[in-house]
Amino acid sequence: MDYLYNPYFTKRHTAFAKNGMVATSQPLAAQAGIEIMQQGGNAIDAAIATAAALTVVEPTSNGIGGDAFALVWVDNQLHGLNASGPAPQSLTIDKVKAAGHEKMPTHGLTPITVPGVPAAWAELSKKFGKLPLLKSLEPAIRYAEEGYPLTPILGKYWKIAYNRFKEIGTSEEFHAWFETFAPNGRAPEIGEMWRSPGHAEILRLIGASNAEAFYHGEIADKIGAFMEKHGGYLRKSDLERYKPEWVTPISTNYRGYDIWEIPPNGQGMITLMGLNILSELPAPIPHDVHSLHNQIEAMKLAFIDGKAFITEQADMPLDYRELLSKDYAEKRVQKIEEHAIIPEPLELPKGGTIYLAAADSEGNMVSFIQSNYMGFGSGIVIPETGIALQNRGADFSLDEEHPNALKPGKRSYNTIIPGFLTKDGQAVGPFGVMGGFMQPQGHLQLAVNTIDYQLNPQAALDAPRWQWVEGNKVLVEPEFPNHLAQALARRGHDIQATVDSGSFGRGQIIWRDPETGVLSGGTESRTDGAIALW
């Protein structure tokens, strides 16, 4: 039986609940969040439970060794958490080049940066949670110990990763990846049980120590010893030095709604820049080629500037607020013509996941994202722990003059971005779209679908998506209307229809009615998405 074959159109409707809601890309993880909420936890505890479960039930996209960001609405205030990790202190451009690399490698020991995920869980639990961290991790521990059957999209990407690592992961440092994720000499099949006892034990240690064991104790010792043995750069001292950062979220007002993102080093401001440019143009109209053209051109301009300038704020060549200003939007909108253009970065003034949304009956809401970056990340797993380490350092530049140049202790440009929507100072709710450089484009399209087109949460997610890649190249989904694709092509866009929707992002939405407190949510049809309700 082919679990990826479905010749028939399927449709989901918006889900509603009053006491609690968790939306994410894997049903068991969504249920883990609701389970913790029903045991006395709030939306923050539920988000932690869901995130931890996802490291077990969707390891193709995230893990204990990755990064995380969160936007948290508590007591009518939005808080931001940046739990992305920096480059190891011993990792330098000279060392990477001396090892024979002209650019940062994408796999192996070199692109590994400090993991922020365990610290994010501990920080969220300490600041806003109701339950002990270990309690919130119980469902994830159970799934790791007892095992679970693979869902269809999970199985699809697990097999893709296995075939990739079979080619590139032939040296000794990759052995633990195969021992952990291909224990029978192959990727597990859809519907087949998989378990990871070592993963369970690590989660138990993280929970019992509020992540201290990961950064200062026995887990840190294991990571440091493995990296030193195999010639990697990450050390226990890098883990000991790490702290996540509470940040002030950034926003823009788009047609009466405030869209919120995490400030740099995240790429969320690209969404805000694109929406600012769109604000200078007539309001988008559904199924209109001119509106689609404007959205694509606005995103191209915002993206090309974001990629040129976003990194650690201290290393950006200009204040990020300049890129969010009306002056910037007015200057960039002048570049939009009737035909597609190939954008160049703005002239400077002289002088690359899983996503989840959670909400409870108290009004607490969480927009949370964590990632190992390119699928399983670096391909490096610490033996007998289930800890797959991220490859976020792959985005660093080896050009010393580039804003995102590699430096010890520096955080790279980061693709993962949670989103949040408010109106007149009240929470509407969390939203997000995971998937590398699709994420800001997905955020912009969800904002337009919701605000301009007045689509419900599920329809806003289901609407066919486009994805700018480079130059004038724009990918469109198989369901994208052909007449619109042809009309965009006549405007100079290099339109390429895909046969698969896997690269177009995977999103979740939860909105809250401010008068009744009723929650409405949508989940991603492009993956094994699910909403758990209470």
Image (cartoon, rainbow, N blue to C red):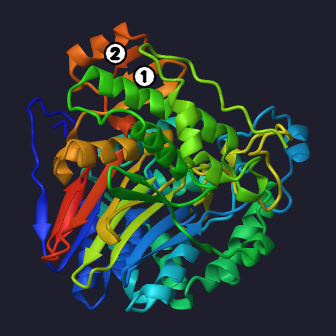
Quarter of the C terminus within the rendering: bottom left
Label 1 crowding class (10 Å Cα cut-off): few <14, some 14-19, many 20+? some
Residue found at the far top of this picture: 490
> Could you tell me the amino acid type at mark 2?
Leu
- The front one of 214 and 445 is 445
31 with respect to 136 (left or right): left
Q: Residue at x 20, y 73 (%)?
A: 514
Which residue is pictured at 80% across the width and 61% down the height?
229
Of the pair 49 and 368, the residue shown nearer to us: 368
367 left or right, relative to 121: left
- Mark with earlier residue (1, 2): 1
Circle 1 residue: 474
**Camera sees residue 352:** no
Query: In this image, 351 relative to 199: left or right?
Result: right
Q: Position of residue 337 (x, y in %)?
A: 46, 18
Q: Amino acid at mark 1?
A: Val
Q: How many marks?
A: 2
424 up-or-down from 438: above or below: below
Check contact, mark 1 vs mark 2: CB within 8 A.
yes
Q: Nearer the viewer, residue 409 or 236?
A: 409
- Which secondary structure lies at badge 1? strand
Of marks 1 and 2, the one in the foreground: 2
* Residue 132 placement: quadrant: bottom left
Which SS class for mark 2? helix
Can you give x and y, in whole percent of width and height, for residue 183 in the image?
46, 54
Q: Which mark is residue 488?
A: 2
> At x 56% / y 49%, what residue is drawn?
324
Q: Is residue 381 above or below residue 433?
A: below
Q: Residue at x 71, y 56 (%)?
A: 312
Q: Is residue 54 above or below residue 330?
A: below
Tell me which corner region of the image, top left, top right, bottom left or bottom right, holds residue 246.
Answer: bottom right
Q: Assess disc 2: are there few (<14), some (14-19) or many (≥20) residues with their C-alpha within 10 Å of its C-alpha.
A: many
